[in-house]
Amino acid sequence: MWQVLVACSGCPEEAEVVVEELDDVDREVCPCGCNYVVLSVSSFEPVYAQRAQLIELPKRRKLSIAA
């Protein structure tokens, strides 16, 4: 997957899109009807997290202030 920062060629709109293939960016169109221009491309790997259990750490003991 790819995360692509695009800008509209007709208005000041910018957006980040996630696509499977870089050729898919050519099919993306701004709501104003103009095509997007690619500004940057980075690989993207989705991470799915399961609900985790909250672990409470023990409180630190009070330390004296060093001089």
Image (tube, rainbow, N blue to C red):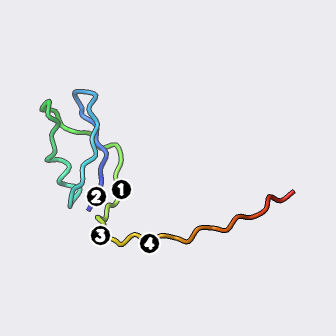
Image quarter for residue 8?
top left
Q: Is residue 24 left or right of residue 37?
A: left
Circle 3 — which element? loop
Q: Which residue is mark 1?
A: 42
Q: Are marks 3 and 1 in contact (CB under 8 Å)?
A: no
Residue beneath the point at 31% across and 65% down: 45
Q: Are marks 4 and 3 in contact (CB under 8 Å)?
A: no
Mark earlier in primary sequence (2, 4)? 2
Mark whose residue sits in front, 4 or 1: 4
Q: Amino acid at mark 2?
A: Trp
Mark whose residue sits in front, 2 or 3: 3
Q: Amino acid at mark 3?
A: Arg
Q: Nearer the viewer, residue 44 or 55?
A: 55
Mark whose residue sits in front, 4 or 3: 4
Q: Are marks 1 and 2 in contact (CB under 8 Å)?
A: yes
Q: Which residue is mark 2?
A: 2
Q: Is residue 38 left or right of residue 26?
A: right
